[in-house]
Image (cartoon, helix red, strand yellow):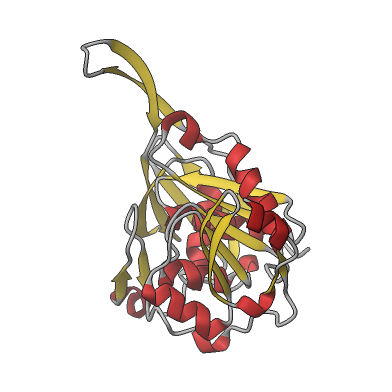
Amino acid sequence: MSARPVLSNAVRKLTHEVEVMDERGRASTIAIPAEQPLTIYVDKRELVTLMTLGGAPEALTLGYLRNQRFIKNIEDILSVQVDWDVDAAAVVTRNGIDNIEERTAKYTVTTGSGEGTVFGGLMDEIDSITLPADARLMQSTLYKIIETIRVHRSVYKQAGSVHSCALFSASGELIHFVEDVGRHNAVDAIAGKMWFDDVSGADKIFYTTGRLTSEMVMKGAQMGIPFLLSRSGATQMGHMVAERLNMSLLARCSGKHFLLLSGADRIIFDDLAVAENA
């Protein structure tokens, strides 16, 4: 593996306890997500402020830079240091970001929890992305993934109000699980982990609790992942992008139920008997 940036390890506590009173006037203490601002600076230039749980701030920063196409090669990043005393992530690069003024002049505000932003043209890279033609997902593996997510320990089960994203192997083994206040941050954090570890997405499966919007589909494609699963639904533009990429988009994934919106040729229905009896 080639040189990797030096990273801090600035994980924050993910929940915060507050006093509440219910409809009967009874007092209790509950946990809520500990949302924090994180301002990303690249070579001392302020780039963006993200609202985050702070569970994987270095990976989030890397994934944001990758998915926004600011930096192509991870070797060009020397370090990512997060300091929660000032709510900042300081990124040091070898050669800066080319044409940064021009590239940040145009942006698209995207849909979803914790609005995402996409600098430059949202659809610019579609035709340059080719997903692996031979990738296949077995129905039984899909069910295994859904069950793994169902039983996985999470902030959501404790405090609610967050989205989760997960990366799985072709056999349905959990590789990464990230929760954040918005699905955009969670997917960026996983992208950052994959980038840092030099992991290919060609034989991977991506799961999110959030909607499969055009930006989510594009981020999955940028990671080279041919399968996107969601507990929620998909938007028209997300569906359109997935069809152009021949990406398998599966929505409403819960229990033994799912809706396959695109990329049907990639799915192997090996568990039809189970599905019919569910």
Which residue is outermost to the bottom? 127
Whole-percent x and y of residue 40? Answer: 41, 54
Viewer-nearest residue: 104 or 233: 233
Query: Where is residue 233 shown, x and y percent of the image?
Result: 43, 61
Residue in the picture at 58% in, 60% down: 191
Q: Quadrant of residue 104?
A: bottom left
Visible residue check, residue 197: no
What residue sits 38% from the left and 30% below the top? 32
Residue lying at the far front of the rendered structure: 277
- Residue 135 in sight here: yes
State the count of labels: 0
Of residue 67 and residue 246, the one placed in the foreground of this image is 246
Quadrant for the N terminus, please.
bottom right
Q: Nearer the viewer, residue 249 or 115?
A: 249
Asked if residue 118 lies left or right of residue 10, the reply is: left
Judged left or right of residue 26, residue 76 is: right
Front position in the image: 142 or 88: 142
Q: Quadrant of residue 263?
A: bottom right
In x, y percent, where is residue 124? 44, 85
From the viewer's perspective, is residue 124 above or below residue 232? below
In the rendered image, residue 2, in percent from the top left (x then y), is placed at 75, 65
In this rendering, the answer to whether 219 lies above or below 98 is above
**Residue appearing at x 25%, y 18% in the figure:** 22
